[in-house]
Image (tube, rainbow, N blue to C red):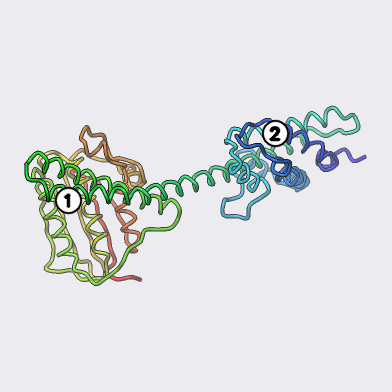
Amino acid sequence: MDSSLADFLEHRIEAIVATAIEFARSVDVGTKLDAAALRDHLPEIVKAIAADMRTPQTRAQEIEKSEGRATRSIEEPRSAAGTHALHRAHSGYSIANLVSEYRALRASVLRLWTEDPEWTALPEEVTRFNEAIDEAIAESVSHYSAEVERWRSIFLGVLGHDLRSPLSAIVMTSELIARMAIDTPITSAAQRLIRSGERMRELLDNLLVYNRAQMGVGFEIERADADLVQACREEIEILQASMPGVHIRFESPRSLQGLFDAGRIREALANLVVNAAKYGTQGSQIRVELLDRGDSAEVVVSNSGEPIAHETFDLMFEPLRRLGVSDGEAERASLGLGLFIVSQIAHSHGGSISGESVNGTTTFKLHLPTASA
């Protein structure tokens, strides 16, 4: 009888799977799984491990496996381990349950093998077996995590979408009360409700943008012929009125025409200016420049403040990150998505966003091609 461990796996596959199923049955996931669900892709995983053990590998490949760098990408066709992970995720298994199932599978193989005197194996075969099962664990965990993240994004998208309707009703009712109210206290209370509702709507919009990016849907823009000078000037007037204690200086050419989503660019400009006001030196001037670069436009926002390390700028455009810590109400209400939204607007226009901090001045540059490629 052939004594290789790979042969043993294939010869005793039903006994190995039966032991693994017993462990799977012991996991409490709320809903009892039937025999087919418990079995799932366990036989295919065992066969894949046996096939892996028979595949010649170099020393470099062995090191790659041991360091966890040999796992196939999520984009590649799913292996039995990857598919098994998705089924277990949908069945209510936690990631700890999933890993424990592989531990039970490993223990089942080693126990059955050592208890059977007819089978022997070389130490290097046991090493190959452990490498193969560790690789299967890594693939399963990777697919499980990706699936959980996908459903989290779906949940956030549905939640954000469904909250917009009742929020719109609250804002509209508040506006109606404000118009009908005669005495000042009621009018002031209604205005507070309106402002709070608009702030909540802004947070929901940002959350939905983040959610679309996480799901790979992308940021939607609607290009149209627009004058960026007029769009930026109008936005700065609104910002200046809402932040009377902040001085904003705007410089631009007479006009700058191009194919832009002017509304989204105004949103990006507002995020940059508010960010500058929040983290810049109090009382200092915020300078906004709109530059015509020929085939592109550049929006430059600069302010004085604490220097920022060069390596920090790349992280600042990642979602759910903040530049600093503030005790203000706006900071407590922030999701840390402002600069992330700016980067999405830039990329959707085929442009870019960059930042630098030199000699106490922090500058953000929003580069925008004047027409689609």
Vertical comparison of 28 with 76: above or below: above
Circle 2 sits on which residue?
A: 25
Query: Circle 1 sits in a helix, a strand or a loop, which is it?
Result: helix
Q: Amino acid at mark 1?
A: Leu
Q: Is residue 141 left or right of residue 156?
A: right
- Find residue 256 and report its image quarter: bottom left
N-terminal of the pair, mark 1 or mark 2, is: 2
Q: Residue furthest left?
A: 183
Q: Nearer the viewer, residue 183 or 136?
A: 183
x, y percentage for residue 255? 14, 69
Q: Quadrant of residue 35?
A: top right
Say what amino acid the circle numbered 2 marks: Arg
**Separation of marks 1 and 2 at Cα, in angstroms:** 59 Å
Horizontal arrangement in the rendering, residue 238 relative to residue 166 (left or right): left
Q: Is residue 344 left or right of residue 327?
A: right
Disc 1, disc 2: CB below 8 Å? Answer: no
Which picture quadrant has residue 96?
A: top right
Quickly name the residue at label 1. 176
Residue at point 50%, 47% (across, down): 151
Q: Where residue 109 sits: x, y (%)?
A: 77, 33
Which is closer to the viewer, label 1 or label 2? 1
Helix, strand or loop at mark 2: helix
Residue 38 in the image: state x and y as whole percent: 70, 40
Q: In the rendered structure, find residue 81 and report the number of the disc placed on it.
A: none
- Count the marks: 2
